[in-house]
Image: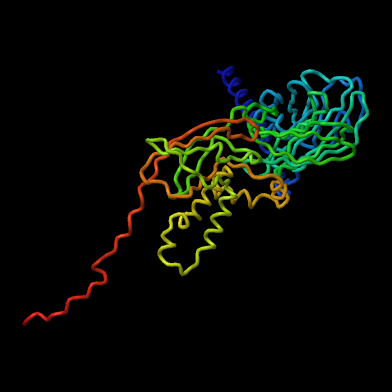
Amino acid sequence: MARAARRAGRQAQSSGLLLAALLAACANTGDPPGGPPDTAPPSIVTVRPESGAVVPDWKDDAVIQFDEVIDEMASGGGSVGAGITGIGRQVVLSPVVGAVRVTWGRTRIRVKPKEGWKPGRVYHLELLPGVVDLRRNKLTKGRLIVFSTGPAIGQAALTGTALQWVEQRALIRALIEVVPVPDSVGYVTVADSTGKFHLDALSAGRYVVYATADQNTNRRRDRREAYDSALVTLDSAATVTLFAFVHDTAGPRLRVAAAMDSITVRLEFSQPLAAGVPLDTARVRVLQLPDSTPVSIRAILNPRQYDSVTAAERSAVKPDTGAAARADSAAAGAPRAAGALRAAARGAPAAARDTAASLDSSEVRLLLAQRPAPFDQVVLRFPRPLTPETRYVIRVRSAVNLSGAAGDGQVVLLTPKPPEPAKTDSTRNAPRPPRTTPPR
């Protein structure tokens, strides 16, 4: 009995100590009672190696030390290059070949390339904005640490803007690569929320600059991701604008033909077309079935040209021309058709495009205006109305995409029934019969 009582007492004492420890641990995660809440983001106190240092024999991890515990960013450390996870999403190290090991250590981040530190390189270690502490206070400004394992650190700077050419907006969080010629490995950074980027501490020389829509965030230029490149000669400073698009090696195909009215047909392609190689009547043929009778085409218009034509047609119609002019299906349907064509050509619904335009800065819109907006639709205008309820074959030869690849295709169009005349109520204006008083 005495032995059982002593055992029970020890268990109760251990449970009490464990409970007290848990309560103390929970209490330490919050702010002191009565004190002001901590709203300051984590701050970098030291980095190793220091920025600007030349360390020929450096073998250890590069370390970024904070003044408080930072969040592990959901999934611990990360391997940058083979699918970035955790705190690795906030770190960019270049130039390196292969993956980068990034580990979290409460108040510090450790970084090292899996290939090791190579002699004769200038390394850029960039901490991106977004690191948070345990109270969710976010670091809103990044930090660039530059150190060398041999050569002198350059003093030139490259700035630029990445754009989505087809979508007509800034390329947010674009992957930027700046590769010295003739090397294959270069410096890497990430564009901000307006598509802008900035790289310091570069040596003078020639570089190939890439901007990529890094959809899977692996910091690689994958095959189906939109990108653009430019050759830049850098002295002390340079600026570049990049228009990213998907580089298709197969040419565009004709997908759909739709009658907009009796003299207008819209063609839709599988890819945006090159504005510098417009379609003409030598490469577009229309045949009326079943006899394959050729049909002449008056004009082939891109979306901007079609807008101009329909605007001119509307302005030429006077308000008092009467029912005959208002019954013209081409004029009546032009505003709606033009709006739909513009929305489809720019690759986004009208509401989404309006929202994106409101977010884009005026500078981005000015940069986009340097090149014609890509389009994946054209409009055929005919000199005479097409026959209703008739099949037509439309063939397109050598349509060229933004990469310069050409493609052929054909579709069959069935023209709709002619609109029925509006029915009038013959009894609406008929004279009313005389009112009679029933006999009493």
Q: Position of residue 68 (x, y in %)?
A: 77, 37
Q: Is residue 255 above or below residue 424?
A: above
Instruction: Decide which of 267, 164 is in the foreground and name it.
Output: 267
Residue reaching furthest to the left: 440
Instruction: Decide which of 288, 262 is in the foreground and name it.
Output: 288
Tell me the quadrant of the picture where the N terminus can be found.
Answer: top right
Instruction: Decide which of 147, 378 is in the foreground and name it.
Output: 378
Q: Is residue 6 left or right of residue 202?
A: left
Q: Position of residue 201 (x, y in %)?
A: 87, 35
Tell me the quadrant of the picture where the C terminus can be found.
Answer: bottom left
The residue positioned 42% from the left and 35% from the top of the image is: 292
The residue positioned 69% from the left and 46% from the top of the image is: 368
Q: Is residue 439 above or below residue 124?
A: below
Q: Is residue 437 above or below residue 53?
A: below
Q: Position of residue 30 (x, y in %)?
A: 69, 41
Q: Position of residue 87 (x, y in %)?
A: 71, 31
Q: How many marks?
A: 0
The residue positioned 59% from the left and 28% from the top of the image is: 250
